Image (cartoon, helix red, strand yellow):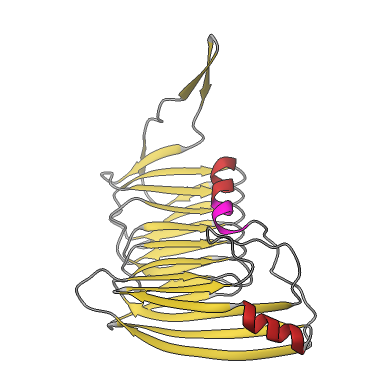
Amino acid sequence: MQNRLSVFIGLLIACLPPLTACAAEVEQNETIRNTYPLSGAAPKKVTVDNVNGSIHVTGYAGSEVRLTAHKRLRAESPETAEQARRDVKLDISQDANTVRFYVDGPFRCRNGGVHIDRDPGYEVKYDFELQVPQDTAIDLKTINDGEIKVDNVAGDYKVDNINGGVEMTELSGSGKVYALNGKVTVTFRENPRGKSSFGSLNGEVRVGFQPDLNADVRFKTFNGAVYTDYEVTYLPLPAAAAERHGAKYVYKSSEWSAVRMGHGGPELSFDAFNGNIRILNRGQ
């Protein structure tokens, strides 16, 4: 568990507290709006890599990405406000049918993660509202001071939040959802056809599927319980891995449990370290 978490956190952030807790004397607000046309043939993808703030993505029957970004700048003085305007930028790029929104600043590492080594005397927050064609794949990340919400998206997804929850409704794709310090709530309009995972370190994981769920399910929780509406058949656990130390072998047992729902199908994994797991039938 620790290795997986350390890799996950290392990719995103070196420290978890908010970027700054400045006592603001200057506050400036700005709204950014734009549209990004997409072609109908090629696969579509939207990436949002945020630091402070929320992300809300809604699928609609259209052919362009519609952006509304609310920027709030708070600073200790006019001088630090000017420094914040120079330091922190929203980089937007489009390559064919892929649109990327990236909040950049001196807090970014070379690998795209975040480090916090001082209080710069300012805070910049972006709250994203996006409308995307329903079949768009999404890759969403944020760290502080915001929730991630997704509605009515049929494409595949990768969603990570550090200090907030994730709520996704009426999905039809497959992918990964993780909230380090928050609740994960997901409902499916169509059950996932591919391997998918749902997890939280400090929060409940609640996922609702259609009644005809056929899947092989793996789950693990340390300080919680697992609940489901579905009838299950227990599956054998994989053999314990062995490591040789001199003349001896050391076996490490799996902490996961495995069951089959319906006739079996794609692997669905659920991981809640300090919370319950609820695998729910939306028809009941």
Dominant SS in magenta: helix
Is residue 112 left or right of 17 when viewed as pictured? left
75 drawn magenta? no
Res 1 seen here: no
The spot of residue 112 in percent (x, y) is 53, 62
**Camera-nearest residue between 185 and 65:** 65
The spot of residue 118 in percent (x, y) is 75, 66
**Camera-nearest residue between 194 and 31:** 31
Where the C terminus falls, by quadrant? bottom left
Q: What span is colored magenta in the figure?
A: 8-13
**What residue is at 37 percent from the left and 87 percent from the top?**
35
Where the N terminus falls, by quadrant? top right
Res 153 seen here: yes
Location of residue 231 by image quarter: top left
The spot of residue 47 in percent (x, y) is 42, 69
Is residue 152 left or right of 3 when viewed as pictured? left
Q: How many marks?
A: 0
**What residue is at 54 percent from the left and 73 percent from the top?**
103
The spot of residue 51 in percent (x, y) is 59, 69
10 drawn magenta? yes
**What residue is at 62 percent from the left and 78 percent from the top?**
125
